[in-house]
Image (tube, helix red, strand yellow):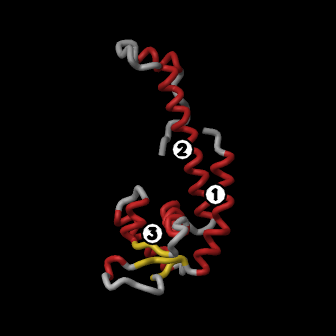
Amino acid sequence: MFFLKDLPSEDMIAGVTVNVPEVSSPRVLSVLTKLRAASVLLRDVEAYLRGHGLSQTQFLALMMIMREPERSSLSAVEIAARLDVSKPVLSKALASLADKGLIAPAASQPADRRQKQLSLTPEGEQRFADVLPGYFSILHDADL
């Protein structure tokens, strides 16, 4: 999260970087403006997902499983490789999704239990289908 609401002026940036000629104050201000917009967008996305009973990590885990066209399941290791979250955070998210009845072990399991495949339940598929259009709408309307 980027918590700076009142961005510095270009003149202020130029004043504190006067001895750093390679720093462009318009560029710094542009990046700060984008960080602020991205932070607001992230808050909007998180509030939207919360309204549907999902965290961002839970939603993205569902998305990782759903976006595989040739497969209907992924292992936790495969999901972790596709997301930028720690293993404990992902484990907690996957456990919560299972508790909500949105994911379950896939019907056909490999012999190696560490590679347990997870798939969306019918309820998980429906929740994902219900949430995705609004999620994409928020992203489409973002002013970045």
In percent of width and height, residue 81 lies at 38, 61
Q: Earlier in the sequence, mark 2 or mark 3?
A: 2
The residue identified by callout 2 is 39
Q: Amino acid at mark 1?
A: Tyr
The residue identified by callout 3 is 93
Q: For the point 52% across and 67% down, which residue is it?
A: 68
- 70 vs 136: above or below: below
Q: For the point 39% across and 67% down, which residue is it?
A: 78
The residue identified by callout 1 is 135
Q: Earlier in the sequence, mark 2 or mark 1?
A: 2
- In this view of the protein, which residue sits in the foreground, 36 or 77? 77
SS type, badge 3? helix
- 131 vs 71: above or below: above
Q: Nearer the viewer, mark 1 or mark 3?
A: 1
Q: Which mark is residue 111?
A: none
Q: Amino acid at mark 2?
A: Ser
SS type, badge 2? helix
